Amino acid sequence: MKLFVERLTVMDFSFLHARRGLVGESWWLDIVLEGGLDEQGMVLDFGEVKRRLKQLVDEHFDHRLLVPADHEGLELRERELRFHTETGERVRHLGPAESVQFIPGREVTPEHTVQAIAAMLAPRLPPNVENVELRLYPEKIEGAWYRYSHGLKQHCGNCQRIAHGHRSRIEIHRDGVRAPALEQLWAERFQDIYIGTEADMVAITQYNDRTCFRFAYEAEQGRFELELPADRCYLIDTESTVENIARHIRERLEATHPGSHFRVRAFEGIGKGAISESADR
């Protein structure tokens, strides 16, 4: 007998890629449990799946930096890791152990991540559950979207982790009319970007003749640092919450198109986000 739950949770995270460096992502997770029936006549109570198994996945993989454990350019030094890309770039990350999750293999893929999740869940399942099947996949998006990474030092939860991210839609209306060209412009500007807060940038460094930005802060979970190429960063003068990102985009649009009324709907991953709209004139 099999029990299934579609879209059990959304994983919002960042991962390290051999060519693209630091990449934000959001994946849906489907789960299928196979086994005999318990005394209730169930493989597992839906409430337990949605509460306990979702909690385990969120705790171990959500809002973390996923690292391909077998990538040849990976260096580990206690809580610090250095990731060298095939294009000569370097990403340096320092943070508490719970801010990182290592994925077996040379790259982070849905298939490799599924194997890591299944291995984590297996010893925590009741004895009547004989097998678990998992599927990870991105949201289908028609229109513009981008991937970004960030960290929120003031956040009391896991968003304080300096390198987690999202795959996000963007919708822009100009004078009441959808503006796909502007949406695509901002999607290209934010593609595979790190949105950093100016106050958190503590140093400008060099690596392989390329300028790099170093971000650092103390948060409730501990000390965080992140260093990556400057051209992979976008600086704003506020915390990089989705509310501030939506407002930032709207203000930039107003500056480049004076007299127009804008409504920006910026997503933070799947199904959530913020709206910033021009004041009535």
Image: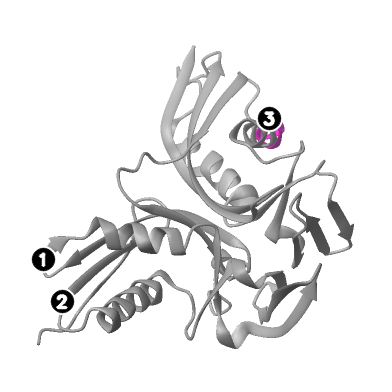
* Coordinates of residue 268 in the picture (x, y in percent): 41, 60
Q: Is residue 28 left or right of residue 247?
A: right
Q: Disc 3 marks which residue?
A: 122
Three-letter residue code for mark 3: Ala
Secondary structure at numbered mark 3:
helix
Crowding at dot 1, Cα within 10 Å, few <14 / some 14-19 / many 20+, comes out as few
- Mark 2 and mark 1 lie on one chain; the one further toward the N terminus is 1
* Coordinates of residue 245 in the picture (x, y in percent): 40, 73
Question: Disc 2 and disc 1: Cα gap in Å?
Answer: 8 Å
Q: Disc 1 marks which residue?
A: 176
* Of marks 3 and 1, the one in the foreground: 1
Residue 194: quarter of image: bottom right
Three-letter residue code for mark 2: His
Q: Tell me, yes or no, if residue 213 can be seen here.
A: yes
Mark 2 in CB contact with mark 1 (< 8 angstroms): yes
Membership of 122 in magenta stretch? yes
Residue 8: quarter of image: top left
Q: Which residues are magenta?
A: 119-124
* Coordinates of residue 222 in the picture (x, y in percent): 72, 75
Q: Disc 2 marks which residue?
A: 261
**Quadrant placement of the C terminus:** bottom left
Mark 3 in CB contact with mark 1 (< 8 angstroms): no
Which is more toward the observer, 257 or 276? 257
